[in-house]
Image (cartoon, helix red, strand yellow):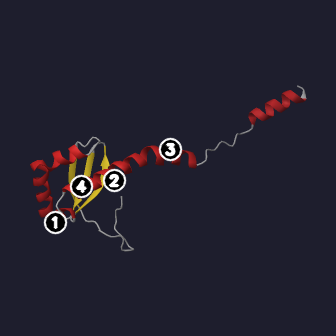
Amino acid sequence: MDDAQLRTVWQQRQFDDRYVPLSQPLTFLMKRVLAKRLRQLGNLARIWDDVLPRSIRDHTALESFNRGVLTVLVDSAAHRYQLQMLLSGGLMREIRARFNGALNKIRLVPGQFFAVDLTGAARYEF
């Protein structure tokens, strides 16, 4: 073998340091997946604040929006029952009419949440 062939064989046997900078997949995730969800949840939060009475709204928190299902935390059974009655009485139709995406279901989940974070600012800002 001559030097050129030896050099070619040696280069082929070397391991490539293949790496992908972390910024590429994170940029895709942020721009394509999370931005759309955040926009939809922000739009739902504005609608939620507009249509819900303050006496019930203060006892709820929007947890997530995935595959057309909005999950809402409700802090007490009494408020959960009132909210269920409002939703079945026409509030669900009004929210669907105002929301430009697919809203198939609103799932009410008992849970606790804090209206403010550690600094005293509102927990959710959209």
Instruction: For marks 3 and 4, give the one nearer the viewer.
Output: 4
Above/below status of 118 relative to 35: below
Q: Distance between the residues labelled 1 and 2?
A: 21 Å
Residue identified by numbered label 3 = 28
Q: How far apart are marks 4 and 1 (CA)?
A: 13 Å
Residue 13 or residue 72, whichever sits in front:
72
Q: Are marks 1 and 2 in contact (CB under 8 Å)?
A: no
User: Which residue is painted at 52% across and 48% down in the image?
Assistant: 26
Residue identified by numbered label 1 = 55
Residue identified by numbered label 4 = 48
> Which of pointers 1 and 3 lies earlier in the amino acid sequence?
3
In the rendered image, the quadrant that contains the C terminus is: bottom left
Q: Which amino acid does label 1 sit on?
A: Ser
Indicate the secondary structure of the residue bearing disc 1: helix
> Which of pointers 1 and 2 lies earlier in the amino acid sequence?
2
Indicate the secondary structure of the residue bearing disc 3: helix
Residue identified by numbered label 2 = 42
Question: Callout 1 environment at 10 Å: few (<14), some (14 to 19), or many (20+)?
Answer: few
> Which of pointers 4 and 1 lies earlier in the amino acid sequence?
4
Q: Do the residues labelled 4 and 2 touch (CB within 8 Å)?
A: no
Above/below status of 41 relative to 9: below
Q: Distance between the residues labelled 3 and 2?
A: 20 Å
